[in-house]
Amino acid sequence: MACWVGLALLVAACAASFDPSGPCTTDGRAAGAYPDLEALVPRDLAGMPATQVDSGRNCSEKALGSLKSHGVDELRFAGAVWETGPNGGVSSAVLEAPNLRADWVHEFYKTGAEAGRNTEQVTFESNAVDGTMFYRMNTLNGESYQTVVDWQDGDRVRVVIVASFIRQTSVGQHDRIVEDVIRSAMAANGN
């Protein structure tokens, strides 16, 4: 699973412990840190319970990356992760910061993919569906198809990340998984 862990959430470093109610002086995450955000992520995917559900926040320049240039000083997040094998997995996350925009989150992932050592065949697209703009990035990272989709959900941004081992999953199967996770994320908030 190491090939996709870097994409799982906007978490560059995890502190051993942090106080989610205090000032943001270090990046951190833990199950139950922000229960209101955790309530917004799906708990199961096609009947399979999440492997992990947690939440946290980032405030370091390294973790915030390009978001820092847009004035984001603290980003709160919650996410659910499903491990689908040794080289694949799924993550559904919700991100929160004042005035956070989906195109900024897309830029964050785009910058990371373009700087990645093993990423190739990186493509980007955006499509409006029922008035909501969806940003999508596809890449091949070693032997893993990886897709990141993000969209605005009110004041928050939703992110879906899917990594599939190319020896076990076709591009068509990978795309169906991406669609299923998006539907699950939208249903988790009653959309």
Image (tube, rainbow, N blue to C red):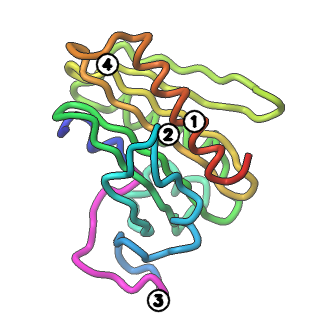
Residue in the foreground of this view, choosing between 183 and 113: 183
Helix, strand or loop for disc 3: loop
* Residue bearing mark 1: 182
- Locate residue 151: give its quadrant: top right
168 displayed left or right of 49? left
**Amino acid beneath label 3:** Gly
Q: Percent position (x, y) of residue 130?
A: 82, 30
Residue 187 painted magenta: no
Looking at the rendered image, the disc whose residue lies closer to the viewer, 4 or 2, is 2
Helix, strand or loop for disc 4: strand
**Amino acid beneath label 4:** Leu
Q: In the picture, which quadrant includes the N terminus?
A: top left
Name the magenta segment's main secondary structure: loop
* Structural distance between the alpha carbons of marks 2 and 1: 6 Å
Q: What residue occupies the far right of the structure in this picture?
A: 131
Q: Residue at x 28, y 35 (%)?
A: 84
* Residue bearing mark 2: 160
- Locate residue 189: give its quadrant: bottom right
- Locate residue 102: give its quadrant: top right
* Residue bearing mark 3: 22
* Structural distance between the alpha carbons of marks 4 and 1: 20 Å
Looking at the rendered image, the disc whose residue lies closer to the viewer, 4 or 1, is 1
* Residue bearing mark 4: 140
Q: First in sequence: mark 3 or mark 1?
A: 3
Asked if disc 3 and disc 1 are in contact, CB closer than 8 Å, the reply is: no
Looking at the rendered image, the disc whose residue lies closer to the viewer, 2 or 1, is 1
